[in-house]
Amino acid sequence: MTTPTIVWLRRDLRLTDQAALLAAAGEGPVVPVYVLDDETPKHRKMGAASRWWLHHSLGALDAALRAKGSRLILRRGKSDDVLAAIARETGAIRVHALHHYEPWWRNAERAVANRLDLVLHDGNYLAPAGSVTTGAGQPYKIFTPFWRALLEQLPPAEPLPVPEQLAPPEAWPTSDKLDDWTLLPTKPDWATGFGEEWIPGEAGASDRLDDFAAIASRYEGQRNLPSIEGTSRLSPYLHFGEISPATIWHAVAAKRGSVDTFLGELGWRDYAQNVILQLPDYGRTNGRPQLDAIRWRDALTDLAAWQQGMTGYPIVDAGMRQLWTSGWMHNRVRMITASFLVKHLLIDWRAGEQWFWDCLVDADYGSNSVNWQWTAGSGIDANMFVRIMAPLSQSDKFDAAGYIRQWVPELATLSDEDIHDPADGQRGTYPVKMIGHREARERALGALATAKAG
């Protein structure tokens, strides 16, 4: 019998447009493997919300593989050790996988390649990270010229089909049981709201894309309104690779209206990978070293109030409560809550990035790091630190009254006019503002001036 080939799955949990799986299927018997590797990422191991998603996504993928006469092998440990062990058990020599650009996955790819014949394919991004360069062959640091250059390589190729068949190996290697990985929270089960919001897996991604395609032409006008379902909500499906960006592109690119704005958001995702390829430590190192001198407040009580959605700013608290309940937050509100932590509370952006890493079902190292540094003003392409979002004005401007009523029910009876900034007598059990906007602004600008003065 033909020697089997291993398909090493990570954040590419799909059958459609899966170049590694298709290549392996063309060679003979296939052994699809997912390794729960907490050793290689170390402090960047997957957060709690992502683990909830992973559990359900792996279950869905295994079911899809079994419908093709295959199955998913689950193992836990260091990726190169696990894959080498499976290769010995099955007689496999070659491993197919998709490129990943997080620094720990690049390390893992090198380790696997030292022990096995590793063949890497593209498919998780519109273009391979590092392939979009200036005329001098240098990587871009700023998004706008990066996006212009990326557009010259687009559209992406049509999505690859699902393999017609997946031949099994002569004998299957042993597999862990998914439930034994205890990826789901139990004591307590804080993820009960996740299941009401999400259906992880490739089928769930396809349904979500169909829903978004129907409204994609209105994206520009609705994406900033948290009270309206105007965003795609495809981010967790993209992060776990349950759908490819090429599939999304070809489903919506022909839509009229403001769909180009949405396509630019797909481009931003590529840009984030471009950044972490250049600066692997971007999740904890300022892109602008001049901000290293800012003296952040060591304010654990204030940080906890922000995490719990108890700051006294309704739009901020609505966002933080949505995050805790559903594992996701509206993009406009992500910017508002991040700006509030950094500029109003003067707390290091890295504390917020770590909280999002643990709480978001779409927690992506590149996007999370780039977005936090953009808001903090510390990134290589970022909003200036002196630009401080006014959360009360943002709430009114983007018509967040309905959103606040949903997530801050203590204020649900207030009028649209009052709910953005309730008077003290209207708050009931809801807390007063932790700090006034003007006071916070002056403190943040003072901290910047002190840092510049040395």
Image (cartoon, rainbow, N blue to C red):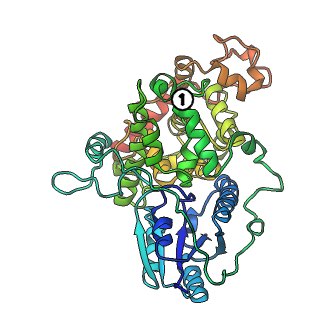
Residue wearing tag 1: 214
Front position in the image: 267 or 366: 267
Residue 326 occupies quadrant:
top right
Give how far across and how far down residue 384 sits, in percent: 37, 36
Compared to residue 111, the image places residue 354 above or below, namely above
Q: Is residue 315 left or right of residue 373?
A: right
| Badge 1 element | loop
Q: Going 26% across and 55% down the picture, which residue do you hit?
A: 139
Give how far across and how far down residue 158 sits, in percent: 40, 49
Residue 36 occupies quadrant:
bottom right
Q: Is residue 112 left or right of residue 146?
A: right
Compared to residue 304, the image places residue 224 above or below, namely above
Q: Going 45% across and 30% down the picture, which residue do you hit?
A: 388
Say whether residue 337 is visible: no
Compared to residue 411, the image places residue 45 above or below, namely below
Give how far across and how far down residue 59 sits, in percent: 70, 60
Q: Going 68% across and 43% down the picture, which residue do you hit?
A: 198
Residue 401 occupies quadrant:
top right
Give how far across and how far down residue 13 sits, in percent: 57, 59
Compared to residue 161, the image places residue 454 above or below, namely above
Q: Is residue 192 left or right of residue 27?
A: right
Front position in the image: 269 or 46: 269
Amino acid marked by disc 1: Ala
Q: Residue furthest left?
A: 136
